[in-house]
Amino acid sequence: MKFKISHFINLLIVVCFGLVPAVICQFFTEKPTSRHIHIRSFRYGKDPYVIRCNRGDTLLLTFSTDDTGHSFFLQEFDMDVKISPSSDEVTVFRTSDPTSKPVITKEVTLIAKHSGIYNYIISKSNYRCHVWCGPMHAFEQGKLILLPNTLLIFSLGSLIGIFFIWLIAIFKNVKQKNISFEEKEGYKDLLKGRSFLRKLITSRYTQATLTIITMVMIYIVILTSVFGTKVSGRNIGVLLMWAIWLFALVAVITPFFGRFWCTICPLPFFGDLIQRKSFFNPVKGKTKIYNNKFSGLFLKWPEWLKNDWPRLFVFLILATFSTTLVATPFVSGVTVIMLMVVPTLMSGIWELRAFCRYICPVSVFVGPFSRMSTLSLRNISQEACDQCKPHYCEKGNTSGWACPYGLNVGKIKENSDCGLCLECLRSCSYNNVSLYTRPFASEKGSRNLSEGWMTMASFTISIIYSILYLGPWPVVRDYVNIMDKHNWGLFGIYSLLMWTLVLVIVPGIIYFLSYAGIRLSKNNRSVKQVFLENAGSLLPFALMNWIAFVIPMLFVNVTFIKQSLSDPFGWGWDFFGTANTPWHQFIPQYIPWLQALAVLTGLYLSLRNIRRSAIVSELDPKNTLLLILPVSLFLAGVTSLMLLFFTN
């Protein structure tokens, strides 16, 4: 109870730090005025791309387009303005009822206020384009900011509150060297006393059924992406992959269930079938050190590549071309085909799941971030593992296949490497393996440099993607537009900048801040050790920033998903009667609030993990603060910038 009360008090403090300035700012609202604003549309942006006005202002809007037809879609104010290059008049539809008679006018009046309490809490809206104008149409957007910006002020106040309780935690009147965090502190055995649940989880039929479902999803993605419409917003393959799957993976599966996606992932399916020559039952035999019969060359993966660098570089290559993948359905489809073919071919050459362990770009995300998960696989008794000689969990037997990831359950201390294939639950003769629930974001630090770099890559790319896809700046998108504008020179600059940030600049900053912390605190720990701890502590913030990024990816496209389910290829079908459903975003007025909440939560958890990592230094509170202050201030600064981005 004491633990829960302390968390409630901390939450109350943070809310008060945010609420007080948010309330005070309401008394400084300027008197409403009238403003004339001309909005110019073009591929792929708006000018102005940000409109700031006082709450209650009357905005008199006129429109023009530089190229083709566009629209000014602003759901929160019930307007969808259709703009034609052949006329200075616009056609105004109501987003709440697009079938009602539109208004044709040269000037549109917008009263910049909301009804009731929303007038004080909704400060940011996105205006978008609802007329397809090219492959990057989905990224054409701008921001309407109502002043005073309650959300921004509340968020920045909350940030100060989080920093305040973090400082209090450091200077609590305790001997920090006596504080320890047990390996399984807060862990609860999910399967203890639940024999039915254990049978359900270890049943091959359960796993096979879920894998077949994801296989069907992959099949649909490939078919519709390759043969369907080139409009990505109406292509069910693109929407399944980049809206539904990405949101589910980032915001649901990985945070709560760790690497459960690997449990049901269809990518290694055919490779496993080739190696094992069996869909269900393990084949008894002897292949090298393993107790199962495997086919293929079954070569060992090169020792010098047994790290995270290969998959990090594969991930960076795909990340570099991410805009093309999202905006061009055919490229998405071909990429998925390659992701099916490569692991299948590799399974005939290298042992076990070499692709999943060393190459898979998805594991760059799910691997590190599974360490934040509330679900983990561990042994029940370490003593039983220490006394075990056959190591069936690793080498397999007639009940379970050898671990596809080459792991011994007795040595699993982190979630990163375990793909939750569940074979060890089946093969352990002592029934000494279980699934545990545990506190969120309980793992800290990084084990080695390649893992640290992978964490920093996820951290950096979450910020780059947010700016690239959610930002209002059309000039930024010109740097990645190689589809119809063929800006290869600008794309080269973007690629060089992204790779340099990921591999050099951000790691360099973290290394320098780690060195500065050691010098300030006069600590004798190695810079490498502190660097790895600080790199690992970025994980909670990085995950929550990814969640902030994917929220609009799904919420904005909910209607398009319904449309595409009825017409998956864009061929004029209407299976479920939803192909012509008018576009409505899902709770767009709350998206900035959810994003701010995610970012602030990430800051809180990262600062907590930084503090916990420093406790092992056995320093007094003052020197503990000096050790972690540089990287903590950096993280607070990044959080401030992301709050400005998401709310202002």
Image (cartoon, rainbow, N blue to C red):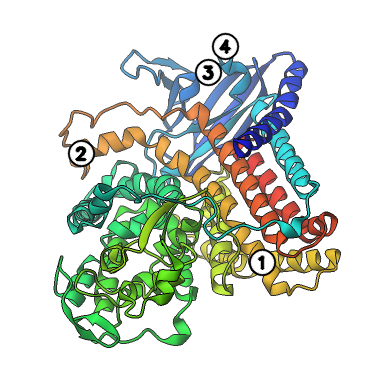
Where's residue 310, x and y in %? 45, 75
Q: Is residue 20 above or below residue 348?
A: above
Q: For label 2, count other residues whose C-alpha is less than 10 Å away and answer few (under 14), some (14-19) or many (20+).
A: many
* Amino acid at pointer 1: Ile
Q: Nearer the viewer, mark 4 or mark 2?
A: 4
Q: Residue at x 48, y 44 (%)?
A: 44
Q: Which residue type carries mark 4?
A: Gly
User: What crowding class fits label 3: few (fewer than 14 Cα within 10 Å), some (14-19), or many (20 or more)?
Assistant: some
Tell me which amino acid carries mark 2. Answer: Asp
Q: Which mark is residue 107?
A: 3
Whether residue 208 is visible, yes or no, is: yes
Say what secondary structure mark 1 lies in.
helix
Q: Which residue is mark 2?
A: 567
Disc 1 target residue: 505
Q: Residues within 10 Å of mark 1 (few under 14, many from 20)?
A: some
Instruction: Confirm or deny contact between disc 4 and disc 2 (CB under 8 A).
Output: no
Of the numbered discs 4 and 2, the one sitting upstream in the chain is 4
Mark 2 or mark 3, whichever is nearer to me: 2
Q: Is 260 located above or below residue 641 in the figure?
A: below
Q: Indicate the amino acid at tag 3.
A: Glu
The tag earlier along the polypeptide, 4 or 3, is 3
